[in-house]
Amino acid sequence: MNKKLLVKVLSVVLALVLGMTVLWACGGEEPQVDEKPELIMATNAAFPPYEFKEGDSFAGIDVDIATLIAEKLGMELVIKDVEFGSIVGGVQSGKFDMGMAGMTVTEERLESVNFSESYATGIQVVIVAEDSTITSLDDMLADGSMKYGVQQDTTGDIYASDTVENGGYGEENVIRYKTGAEAVQALKAGKLDAVIIDNEPAKSFVAANEGLRILEAEWAVEDYAICIAKENTELLEKVNGALAELEAEGKIQEIIDTYIK
Ligand code: ARG
């Protein structure tokens, strides 16, 4: 080897060693502190008081409970705001780790995903205009010409769209909206006779909009739970464990009480 070549080889080696030392030193300077695994939760944040947007961040009963679950699991909660109807499929395909959206446990959904233990109860109710002549669910059935607004793919949609024989109002009389809030705006604008939606969001919407009232009648009582992919039994167990602890610590009730007076 001539001298020139030797110098070249040595300088390359030196550069490599230096480079690696620098890399190693930088890595050492910023140790990966607290790199928690993510817990990706899909929701539809237009459903107060369970989930809603507060500026750029999310708030609500589900958000607070999920935050505590993630804390207990040593994970970092990441919330994705998506269309309600895409939550179950996204959880099933593994795009999201869990779906938490005031979501009712139904037989049909159970065919695609698992549900945690229930953490809350929901009731389907009916919102009408304050001056509406509707006083009962029977009034709604008797008049075949009414239009009912629902949030697409919710249980309110599923029940209302069913045939009259099955207790619904017929698909042709149901108008589907992306969010409950949009259905409520349509009701206010006189485009609908009634909106069928869960009771707590119904109360929030009626409080935030003048000229609306909720019928006394309760339609269906439902259990809310967190959906998780069928094969992810490990997460299901962990979430159920965390929920049981939070329940025992009184935290679930505490959270519900801060949002529902
Ligand atoms: N409880 C109803 C259902 O499961 C409605 C839930 C809607 N939730 C929402 N975040 N928009 O179908």
Image (cartoon, rainbow, N blue to C red):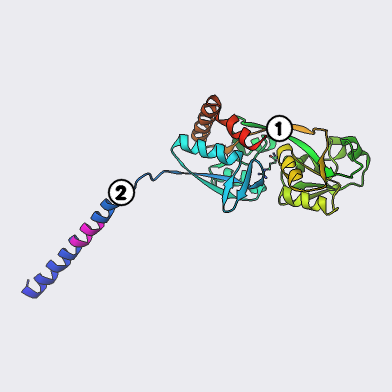
Q: What element carries label 1?
A: strand
Q: Quadrant of residue 100?
A: top right
Q: In which quarter of the image is ligand 1?
A: top right
User: How far across and down, in percent of the image, does residue 179 sit?
Assistant: 71, 50
- Residue, disc 2: 31
- Residue, disc 1: 222
Q: Quadrant of residue 24?
A: bottom left
User: How far across and down, in percent of the image, does residue 56 sit?
Assistant: 57, 53
Where, quadrant-wise, is the C terminus in this rendering? top right
Q: Does the magenta stretch include residue 7?
A: no
Mark 1 to mark 2 CA distance (whole Å): 47 Å
Quick one: 195 or 106, which is closer to the camera? 195
User: How far across and down, in percent of the image, does residue 189 sit?
Assistant: 83, 54
Check mark 1 vs ligand 1: CB closer than 8 Å? yes or no: yes
Q: Is the magenta stretch mostly helix, strand or loop?
A: helix
Q: Is mark 2 on a helix, strand or loop?
A: loop
- Relative to 246, say whether 32 is above or below: below
Quick one: 119 or 141, which is closer to the camera? 119
Picture residue at 67% right of the left edge, 43% below the top: 48
Label 1 crowding class (10 Å Cα cut-off): few <14, some 14-19, many 20+? Answer: some
Identity of the amino acid at label 1?
A: Glu
Left or right side of 149 for 140: right
Picture residue at 61% right of the left edge, 31% below the top: 119
Identity of the amino acid at label 2?
A: Pro
What span is in magenta? 18-23
